[in-house]
Image (cartoon, rainbow, N blue to C red):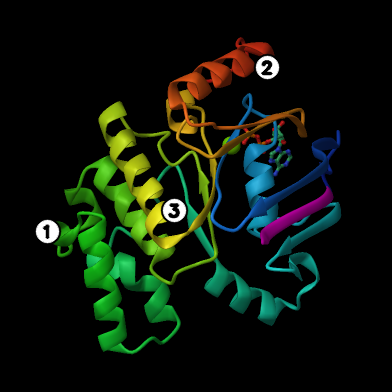
């Protein structure tokens, strides 16, 4: 089943000089997929995620999530639809400094008015799976970057969204913490069937995805599926990245 479908999506930023950040993007994501999005800096990756998350609107074209034409929903139904179907994770974690880890994770459920016992059950479960049980009473400044990103992931998926959007979730982490975060994402994908669309610069991280989409100048440049051999997939990713132009590539 297709969970997400983009049809001829264009995004032009108007200004003194207008800039076309997305140019006729067409692609579909099937339920349960774990997809990596790669491309040089400025190629339109964040714009793509923003248009899918409805944080921004396309200049033309359509975005269907679960067969709903997102940008044609009324403001109220869109807010509700987003809250129940989408989760977001960003490079800089975006945790609330004045709230404990427990409160941060529960925020989306609390905003929906979920019953306390239901929230608590969901929290215990997710905290255990993501290895956060010991740090629930701490504040964001009392935990490591890797832990902070796992908290952000817990917050993003505690309401069981259909699609998790992650914009360079390992971009601010060292390789060990990246690895932990990647493990958690893989586990969420495999064990809970969370569909994930993740922007990453890291070819190792990307080699864990089922499919990698390469973007250049707002267009799909290439797309590759991983076979059984992750090492071979990693090598293929490196090859495409070098063709894409290493000079503009910001690691
Ligand atoms: N709000 C904006 N206004 C004008 N131009 C923008 C805006 N956001 C992004 N851009 C431009 O659109 C292009 C794509 O940006 P972005 O999607 O952030 O790229 P990426 O995430 O791949 O690095 C860049 O050239 C960027 O400067
Ligand atoms: Mg970006």
* Residue situated in front as seen by the camera: 11 or 192: 192
Which residue is the site of mark 1?
A: 134
Whether residues under marks 2 and 1 lie with C-beta atoms below 8 angstroms apart, the answer is no
User: Is label 3's Cβ within 8 Å of ligand 2?
Assistant: no
Q: Is residue 81 above or below residue 238?
A: below
Q: CA distance from mark 2 to mark 1?
A: 43 Å
Image quarter for ligand 1 equals top right
Looking at the image, residue 17 sits to the left or right of residue 182; the answer is right
Residue 230, given in percent of the width and then of the height, sits at: 45, 27
Q: Is residue 82 visible?
A: yes
Q: Nearer the viewer, mark 3 or mark 1?
A: 3
Residue 100 shows in the view: no
Above or below — where is 11 with respect to 205?
A: below
Write the residue at 47% across / 47% down. 90
Q: What residue does disc 3 label?
A: 189
Element marked by disc 3: helix
- Residue closest to the eye, 240 or 138: 240
Percent from the top left, x then y, of residue 228? 48, 31
Inter-mark Cα distance, 2 to 3? 28 Å
Q: Earlier in the sequence, mark 2 or mark 3?
A: 3
Q: Is mark 1 within 8 Å of ligand 2?
A: no
Q: Main secondary structure of the magenta part?
A: strand
């Amino acid at each position: 089943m297709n969970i997400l479908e983009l049809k001829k999506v264009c995004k032009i930023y108007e200004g003194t000089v207008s800039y076309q950040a997305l140019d006729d993007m067409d692609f579909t994501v099937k339920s349960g997929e774990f997809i990596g999005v790669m491309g040089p800096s400025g190629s339109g990756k964040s714009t793509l995620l923003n248009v899918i998350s409805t944080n921004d609107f396309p200049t033309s074209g359509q975005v269907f999530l679960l067969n709903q034409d997102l940008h044609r929903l009324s403001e109220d139904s869109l807010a509700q639809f987003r809250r129940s179907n989408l989760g977001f994770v960003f490079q800089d974690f975006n945790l609330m400094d004045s709230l404990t880890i427990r409160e941060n994770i529960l925020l989306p459920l609390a905003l929906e008015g979920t019953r306390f016992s239901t929230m608590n059950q969901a929290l215990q479960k997710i905290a255990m799976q993501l290895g956060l049980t010991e740090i629930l009473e701490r504040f964001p400044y009392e935990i490591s970057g890797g832990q902070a990103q796992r908290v952000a992931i817990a917050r993003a998926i505690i309401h069981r969204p259909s699609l998790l959007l992650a914009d360079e979730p390992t971009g601010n982490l060292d390789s060990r913490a990246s690895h932990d975060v990647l493990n958690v994402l893989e586990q969420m994908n495999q064990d809970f069937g969370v569909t994930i669309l993740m922007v990453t610069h890291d070819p190792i991280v990307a080699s864990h995805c089922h499919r990698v989409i390469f973007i250049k100048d707002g267009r799909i440049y290439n797309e590759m599926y991983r076979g059984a051999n992750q090492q071979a997939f990693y090598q293929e990713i490196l090859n495409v990245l070098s063709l894409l132009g290493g000079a503009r590539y910001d690691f």
